[in-house]
Image: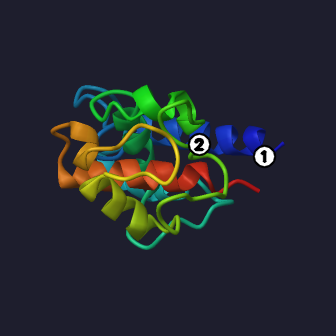
Amino acid sequence: MKNLMRYSTILLILVMASCGGEKGAPAADDAQPPAAEATPAASEAAPSMDLPEGVTAAMVAEGQTIFTSAGICFTCHMEGGVGGPLAPNLTDEEWLNIDGSYESIVSNIMTGVPEPKEHPGLMLPKGGTNITDEQVQAVAAYVWTLSQGD
């Protein structure tokens, strides 16, 4: 049930983000309201989850995209952040190297994990990628939501 709620929330976030907001804004010739009008709806995409201060549903959706693409996070943490032989599960409540707060996740991604407490794979700063600081914040927002199920 916990996973069903989590995936339903993420799906809702993705649907809402694809309907508007900065990254998911429709083409100018589409008969959709401007992104500024769509932003409030996107921020309400996760009604059962109180996001950390400064985090929006659009950031979570962008973070999921980066997690599975440019951020290459999925190569060690696996698709959906379920963990694997090289890196821990991000979907449970256990945090091995940090306290699990949004701020600590941002910091962890920025600095990397040179000496993990478990798992043989170390993590380079920004996962060894060229993602921006804003993209790190989006990935951290997505990762934070993974462990926030009921």
Tell me, yes or no, if residue 59 can be seen here: no
Measuring from the top left, give residue 46's x and y in whole percent: 60, 54
Q: Which mark is residue 62?
A: none
Image quarter of residue 7: top right
Q: Residues within 10 Å of mark 2 (few under 14, many from 20)?
A: many
Image quarter of residue 110: bottom left
Distance from disc 1 to disc 2, alpha carbons, whole Å, reads 15 Å
Indicate left or right for 71 with 91 as reference: left
Q: Amino acid at mark 2?
A: Asn
Residue visible at 15% across and 39% down in the picture: 130
Q: Amino acid at mark 1?
A: Lys
In the rendered image, which residue does mark 1 sit on?
2
Q: Residues within 10 Å of mark 1 (few under 14, many from 20)?
A: few
Q: Which mark is residue 89?
A: 2
- Residue 61 drawn above or below residue 50: above
Tell me whether the residue at label 1 lies in contact with that at label 2, contact meaning CB atoms closer than 8 angstroms.
no
Tell me, yes or no, if residue 75 can be seen here: yes
Measuring from the top left, give residue 138's x and y in whole percent: 35, 51
- Residue 10 drawn above or below residue 97: above
Indicate left or right for 86 with 128 as reference: right
Measuring from the top left, give residue 120's x and y in whole percent: 45, 38
Indicate left or right for 113 with 28 as reference: right
Measuring from the top left, give residue 31's x and y in whole percent: 35, 31
Of circles 1 and 2, the one toward us is 2
* 1 or 2: tag closer to the N-terminus: 1
In terms of secondary structure, where does tag 1 sit? helix
Residue visible at 39% across and 33% down in the picture: 65
- The front one of 17 and 82 is 82
Residue visible at 45% across and 59% down in the picture: 40
